[in-house]
Image (cartoon, helix red, strand yellow):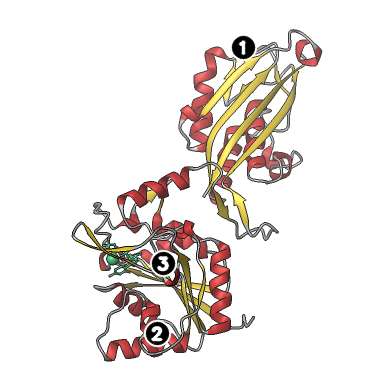
Amino acid sequence: MDYDYKIAVIIAAAGKGERIGKAVPKQFISIKGKEILEHTINVFRGIEMLDVFLALPEEFVDGAEAKYKVKKVVAGGKTRQESVYNAFKCIDAEQYKWVLVHDAARPFLSAQLLGKVLDQTMISGSAVPVLELSDTVKTVSEDTVTNTLERDTLRAVQTPQGFEYGILKKAFDRANDEDFTGNDESALLERIGESVYTVQGEKINFKITTEEDLDIAKIMMGTVLFQKVDRENDNPSGNIRPRIRVGTGFDVHKIVSGREMIIGGVNMPSPDGLMGHSDADVLTHAIMDAILGAAGLPDIGINFPNNDEKYRDIFSIKLLEQVGNIIREKGGTIVNIDATLIGERPRIAPYREEMISNISKALRIDPKSVSIKGTTTEKLGFLGREEGVAAEAVVLVEFF
Ligand code: CTP
Ligand code: MG
């Protein structure tokens, strides 16, 4: 494959979304904390040979380059074709040999399909993903059937549509000269006799068009097993990783005299306390390790080494805040935390709410997502002899 040139991706996001008819155009509707448009842009993010050119409604252009972190933002036009052309005009023919055009309203584009369209475009000069129709197709007039079509030669066409720059330029020039408006870019090629090659599309790559589609999109993004494209880790399963990941953490600190007993960020009344380089907040440490574990990151000992003076006697809730930042940067949202403090003492019941409040504030999550329990070991073992306190935690993290 010829990867010397870059590929320009035009995302058409300048429509009004009239069929859905919400207060904002559909591409700006948030699902799971992110606009549909952001979900779509994320599919292309991090692929070095791609640059995104975004067409937005005029009133959304201001500040959008910084917000969406794309190469270029332009104002769209009255028709989709005009919007795409406005972006196309900014693409430098010297730099970009291929152009992909994708609907903002298709956030479920997979890495596989993107790869297929790119490969076919590089081989043939154009590529569009198509689906065979599984339903019988009829023409109707008002509410009466007028004809049944021969299904075998019909295809539903999706985006991204890929083109060699020169071919698309020629098609746009001719369409502009002749004042022709097509439904999609490939229609512009067809009318000037350029071949349009097809690749197998994916049902999951549907366009959010109606309110029902929006509901389906929400269900899909909320589904635990739904997977996301992972650009950071090239893995054999095709750059796909699960959205939901679990992590566990476990920690023990020794009870000694002359130290404070800080647990869950609460300085508990106690004749003695926990030994450690930091404040030895055993519960907070278990929670931090669980969060880091869910993200596949090394444990707190590596992130915050106990021979680093910076961390001497540090309030561990501060470190938890940093772990919260790390997880957000990785695109993670904590779904819930369930932690247990294990030992004969201290009794946590009177301080549970305060601990939950400290932890949820540090992580900027809903306190209802945090559960803290206490148990003893029936006086057995080192915990039973009150030589130390242990804690374990499980967290669930959802990645976007
Ligand atoms: N689009 C665009 N400029 C336009 C019209 C549409 O960039 N003037 C974009 C849309 O934002 C969308 C894609 O083209 O991502 C596909 O169009 P469609 O699904 O028809 O979206 P809308 O035109 O926004 O919706 P509607 O037709 O219901 O108004
Ligand atoms: Mg439209």
Q: How many neighbours does mark 1 have within 10 angstroms: few (below 14), some (14-19), or many (20 or more)?
A: some
Q: Are marks 1 and 3 in contact (CB under 8 Å)?
A: no
Q: Which mark is residue 189?
A: 2
Residue occupying the point 67% across, 61% down: 234
Secondary structure under the numbered disc 1 in the rendered image: loop
Question: Compared to 381, does 322 lie above or below?
Answer: below
Q: Earlier in the sequence, mark 1 or mark 3?
A: 3
Q: CA distance from mark 2 to mark 1?
A: 74 Å
Q: CA distance from mark 1 to mark 3?
A: 71 Å
Residue sticking out furthest to the right: 381
Left or right: residue 172 versus residue 114 is left
Residue occupying the point 34% across, 56% down: 28
Residue occupying the point 33% across, 58% down: 209
Secondary structure under the numbered disc 2 in the rendered image: helix
> Of the residues shown, which amino acid type is indicated by label 1?
Arg
Q: Nearer the viewer, residue 305 or 194?
A: 194
> Of the residues shown, which amino acid type is indicated by label 2?
Leu
Image quarter hosting the N terminus: bottom right
Q: Which mark is residue 151?
A: 3
Left or right: residue 311 versus residue 116 is right
Q: CB of residue at label 2: within 8 Å of ligand 1?
A: no
Numbered disc in front, either 3 or 2: 3
Q: Position of residue 159 (x, y in %)?
A: 44, 69
Secondary structure under the numbered disc 3 in the rendered image: helix
Q: Earlier in the sequence, mark 3 or mark 2?
A: 3
> Of the residues shown, which amino acid type is indicated by label 3?
Arg
Q: Which mark is residue 347?
A: 1
